[in-house]
Image (cartoon, rainbow, N blue to C red):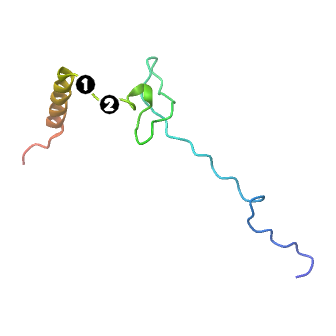
Amino acid sequence: MEGTPCDPGTTPQNAAPRARYVPPQCGARCRDGHPCKAATMLWRSRCRMHGGASTGPRTPEGKAKALACLAAGRARRARPPS
């Protein structure tokens, strides 16, 4: 096949551009009602303003309240005995 141009192959100059990594969005509701568009923190599902950097309750009262809410939530989601 004379006269056909050779296939340039895949080289860095003619390779298709790679898609740019876009971190997931927070999605929490802001005060005005729209979803937050900030990037999530690494290995978390929310941004730093909406709890991604939270280390949890620190006072004994806060820890007790969190434990009570956890138990109540689990009781609500528990399957009824069959």
Image position, residue 2 (x, y; %): 91, 81
Three-letter amino acid code at the position of disc 2: Thr
Residue positioned 19% across, 28% down in the render = 69
Image position, residue 48 (x, y; %): 44, 29
Image position, residue 53 (x, y; %): 39, 31
Checking the image for residue 19, the label placed there is none
Give the quadrant of the N terminus.
Answer: bottom right
Three-letter amino acid code at the position of disc 1: Arg
Give the spatial CA distance, label 2 vs label 1: 8 Å
Asked whether disc 2 touches disc 1, contact meaning CB atoms under 8 Å apart, the reply is yes
User: Could you tell whether 81 is left or right of 67 in the image?
Assistant: left
User: Could you tell whether 75 is left or right of 41 in the image?
Assistant: left
Image position, residue 26 (x, y; %): 45, 33
Dot 2: few (<14), some (14–19), or many (≥20) neighbours within 10 Å?
Answer: few
Q: How many marks?
A: 2
Label 1, secondary structure: give it.
Answer: loop
Q: Which residue is mark 2?
A: 55
Which quadrant of the figure has residue 57? top left
Label 2, secondary structure: give it.
Answer: loop
User: Could you tell whether 62 is left or right of 49 in the image?
Assistant: left
Which quadrant of the figure has residue 6? bottom right
Residue positioned 46% across, 36% down in the render = 40
Dot 1: few (<14), some (14–19), or many (≥20) neighbours within 10 Å?
Answer: few
Name the one closer to the observer, 38 or 35. Answer: 38
Q: Height in image: 82 above or below 24?
A: below
User: Could you tell whether 57 is left or right of 51 in the image?
Assistant: left
Q: Residue furthest bottom?
A: 1
Checking the image for residue 58, the label placed there is 1
Residue positioned 45% across, 36% down in the render = 41
